[in-house]
Amino acid sequence: MDSLVSDYAKKIELEGKSSRASKAELESLETKILETSTIAYNSKKENEPLELKGATLEQFRLDVEAGVRAEIAKKNAAIEEAAEAKKVKAKAAREEKAA
């Protein structure tokens, strides 16, 4: 499952790039994601069927991808918040120094 999550993260990162190498890597990654997600889904279906809550393979894949996107958005928001806090702190230090 960790491999699947990291593959989705890499896929999301590559989606905005337009180079041939990126597109080729994205295609390869999508194939790998399909294979890995099928294995993970079948494993969960066999070992933890209640956790799937009747989800199809496609729903499972979409849920995993949505979870990865949410984690990335949360991480990016935290980074932006930290950068903003740093700017505010620097501005306060400059104002204090000027006073």
Image (tube, rainbow, N blue to C red):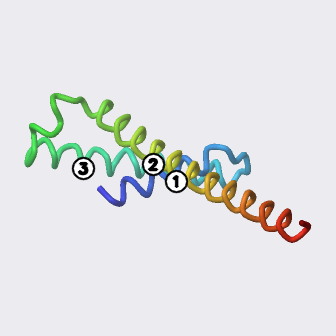
Q: What is the secondary structure assignment of the residue under circle 3?
A: helix
Give the foreground label among 1 and 3.
1
Quadrant of residue 92 in the image?
bottom right
Q: Is residue 98 left or right of residue 11?
A: right
Query: Which residue position holds label 3?
Result: 39
User: Callout 1, which amino acid?
Assistant: Lys
Q: Earlier in the sequence, mark 2 or mark 3?
A: 3
Tell which of 74 and 98 is nearer to you. Answer: 98
Q: What is the secondary structure assignment of the residue under circle 1?
A: helix
Query: Which residue position holds label 2?
Result: 71
Quadrant of residue 6 in the image?
bottom left
Quadrant into which the C terminus falls: bottom right
Give the foreground label among 2 and 3.
2
Query: Which residue position holds label 1?
Result: 75
User: Callout 3, which amino acid?
Assistant: Ile
* Residue appearing at x 73%, y 51% in the figure: 19
- Cα–Cα gap, marks 1 and 3: 28 Å
- Cα–Cα gap, marks 2 and 1: 6 Å
Quadrant into which the N terminus falls: bottom left
Q: What is the secondary structure assignment of the residue under circle 2?
A: helix
